[in-house]
Image: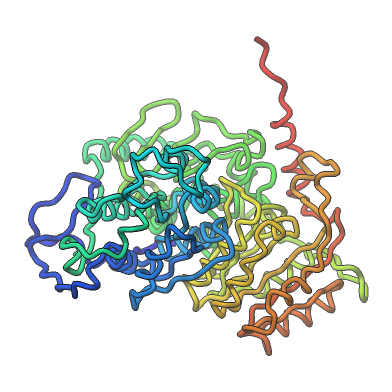
Amino acid sequence: MDTKIGSLDVCKPTSNDIGSPPNGTVATIQGSVSPTVINCSEATLGRHLARRLVQVGATDVFSVPGDFNLTLLDHLIAEPELNLIGCCNELNAGYAADGYARSRGVGACVVTFTVGGLSVLNAIAGAYSENLPLICIVGGPNSNDYGTNRILHHTVGLPDFSQELRCFQTVTCYQAVVNNLEDAHELIDTAISTALKESKPVYISIGCNLAAIPHPTFSREPVPFSLSPKLSNKMGLEAAVEATAEFLNKAVKPVLVGGPKLRVAKACEAFVELADASGYALAVMPSAKGLVPEQHPHFIGTYWGAVSTAFCAEIVESADAYLFAGPIFNDYSSVGYSLLLKKEKAIIVQPERVVIANGPAFGCVLMKDFLRALAKRLKHNNTAYENYHRIFVPEGHPLKASPREPLRVNVLFQHIQNLLSSDTAVIAETGDSWFNCQKLKLPRGCGYEFQMQYGSIGWSVGASLGYAQAVPEKRVIACIGDGSFQVTAQDVSTMLRCGQNTIIFLINNGGYTIEVEIHDGPYNVIKNWNYTALVDAIHNGEGNCWTTKVFCEEELIEAIEMATGAKKDCLCFIEVIVHKDDTSKELLEWGSRVSAANSRPPNPQ
């Protein structure tokens, strides 16, 4: 699931280039390229930004217009290779850029000053938590207004325009405020290249009066970025590999567990190579599902403590050594801090650091380099997988439903499983879909995304929009709860405008089910909507859309046949009516443990 960013893979420095910047920095190629001269009327800040976005792979940009960004939007849409997609609100524009970045490797959104910026902020924070390179562009105040003590609209009524910037500083890795043309080129290029290098969001504010002005620095086609590859400390790498190999080769039944930071470390292939070479049993943390092929001969499932897939936790937690590659251990992934792991048995490999049990730690060691070098040093040991194979019992099937029996969630997901192929991608919303989708067996090439670290309800609507736009050859299957859908439903409209053929399973159980299992109360019951009628109203006869409401398995089968047959080119919205207490057993277990963690009394003073 490693991603490639635009044309960056083909513009690495050659021997003819002038110098190479320090490890991890960014430069442009200067010696071997003769950039095309641009017509003066197109040599504007706005067109330069548009060309840069196209160049790095963000050929679709999600936006909401506002008076501070209108001229900038004119210049973005003037770029022939860039597609500007108007969203219903800034939050969904940010979520769409998030979903786009998960597939394309980089995403971008454009909003207006403060009212738009603070609205998109929640989505940017989510992208930051998930290590996604996302370029958030804000149309800012007129450059003449800075430092004048004037009060502007779209602000909190103070002459200080830095409030938005200060908010973004904690959820972006670089902030550029462009209020003059002299350094605009440098600021924009530095921001975009930093997003790619750090795999984090960046913030670019552009004065509303600057986007249309030509400037000599924009008079040539921008030279492609050259991201200098980070390098491992050679001695540190050798020492880390030697210490780890000694540790693991002594173990009787070691295992490998992949974590979500495999993506940002671009180490998915290296991790599989290690599994191939070592013979170890191979599991993934829940937020790493989709990063490792589940067809691997030693794959044993998802390790999620007490709510792991069948027999996986028993093998991982009984191992005498475990290597975690790119893990995030938080209260959700640890099921309320209840994992039965011991530090003295663990090797933790982060993108640039290796920690061995209670002993040594090695910095400046890149995960990809480390895993590939380690694969050459490990003795083959398939004991843990053999133990798994011995105790494994195939999962049973849901009880056969009686004719016209109210639909059960486990029956629904049995049919969703049959929909999956290399031409599909699953987007799982925060809630019980986390647990039900986790049990899906992904065919090779099937995409899978969810937002576990940040867990913002409603994320999946915008993310489905962005992901489908980034990979039009895949059909997105989105599993969304009714409570989450009510937060961000509007951008089904944008899916229709873009001609997407996503299948949305709207699971209507009358409330915030995941919250019910953590801590119940009347606030978890929501007003029921006629969801199919809502989507029909949004459709309004424009675009290809088909909706239906199902109450039993027979109706579900008919709906899926229609969605994959006569309506395969339509956006298909299937509202599934289920009982309010019909949840996965994993959510019941997880909810009680997270509840216990949340309700711990204060430590004695």
Q: How is the image coloured?
A: rainbow
Is residue 56 visible in this depiction of the protein? no
* Quarter of the rendering containing residue 4: bottom left
Is residue 187 visible in this depiction of the protein? yes
The image position of residue 385, as x and y in percent, is 55, 52
The image position of residue 603, as x and y in percent, is 66, 16
The image position of residue 399, as x and y in percent, is 85, 65
Closer-to-camera residue (257/51): 51
In percent of the image, x 27 and y 62: which residue is there?
45
In percent of the image, x 60 and y 78: which residue is there?
501
Left or right? Give the position of 458 relative to 164: right
In which quadrant is the N terminus drawn? bottom left
Closer-to-camera residue (382/52): 52
In which quadrant is the C terminus drawn? top right
Farthest residue in the top direction?
605
* Quarter of the rendering containing residue 213: bottom left
In percent of the image, x 49 and y 43: which residue is there?
327
Q: Is residue 522 above or below residue 28?
A: above
Farthest residue in the bottom direction?
566
Number of callouts:
0
Closer-to-camera residue (436/595): 595
* Quarter of the rendering containing residue 502: bottom right
The image position of residue 372, as x and y in percent, is 33, 51
Left or right? Give the position of 109 relative to 16: right
In percent of the image, x 57 and y 75: which residue is there?
475
Left or right? Give the position of 184 relative to 371: left
Left or right? Give the position of 510 relative to 340: right
